[in-house]
Amino acid sequence: MLVSLRKKIKEFLRRNVIGGKNSKISRKATIETLLTLEDHVLIKDGCRFGGPPISIGRYTGLMNDVEVIGPVTIKRYCAIARNVLFQGRNHWSNWNALQTRFYKELLDEKLPYVDKGGIEVGNAVWIGTQVIVLPGVTIGDGAIIGAGSIVTKDVEPYSIAVGVPAVHKKYRFKPEVIQELLEIKWWDWPLGKIKRNKEFFMTDLTSIKDVKSLIVE
């Protein structure tokens, strides 16, 4: 009986999921939209997915109580801390009332949403706890968003952005190192190549001049 119940819960969670080989999706996650996953994605307790379609890349992890309202794309190897909100769209504000329930229950109509192009999170991004990312934002590869920030505009690759609204504080590495990393695109490597390149991933890049010299083909 218990095995049968677990199987039904797993099937229910998976009904809106495409892909996701070797991924771990908590049975306490709520999936109310089409969710496309690459392999080895981690989704923990209390995460919720709604709105237009959402996609998440390889080895990205979402900690507890992350809410994603599409359209949202989160690419590979991202670390998303607990209680983060991705708000991929907003209510239409040019009508008198602003509540979806009002239009549905009292007028038998739908309140439109404003689509600003959704949200795109690049590869290897770290987003701290209780961050809010608003519609139309692109966060570049390798960026860090500090805890409690509200992201209202694009964040450059390998930038550290903090605050309400989030503003650029500094770059993680020197410009030439950032350029090399963007050319290398290590997040597209096969897993075997990643495993061969332990030194590349465990070297302090703030004090190195030639990143490519670390790579083992």
Image (cartoon, rainbow, N blue to C red):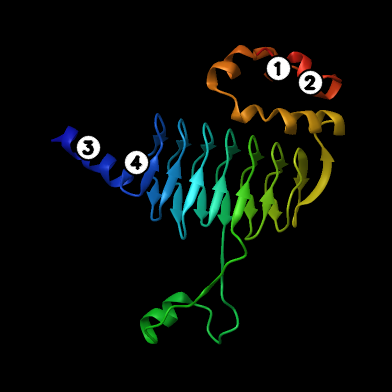
Along the line of sight, the residue nearer the viewer: 163 or 31: 31
In the image, what residue occupies the spot 39% across and 79% down? Answer: 104
* Sequence-earlier tag: 4 or 3: 3
Query: Distance between the Cα atoms at labels 3 and 2?
Result: 47 Å
**Residue beneath label 1, please?**
200
**Residue beneath label 4, please?**
27
Query: Distance between the Cα atoms at labels 2 and 4?
Result: 41 Å
Q: Amino acid at mark 4?
A: Arg
* Sequence-earlier tag: 1 or 4: 4
Q: Quadrant of the C terminus?
A: top right
Q: Quadrant of the N terminus?
A: top left
Where is residue 112 shown, x and y percent of the image?
Answer: 50, 75
Query: Distance between the Cα atoms at labels 3 and 1?
Result: 41 Å
**Residue beneath label 2, please?**
211
Which disc number belongs to residue 7?
3
Where is residue 4 shown, x and y percent of the image?
Answer: 16, 36
In this rendering, the answer to whether 184 lies above or below 122 is above
Q: Amino acid at mark 1?
A: Phe
* Sequence-earlier tag: 1 or 2: 1
The reply to whether the C-beta atoms of the residues labelled 1 and 2 are less than 8 Å apart is yes
Left or right for 3, reference 70: left
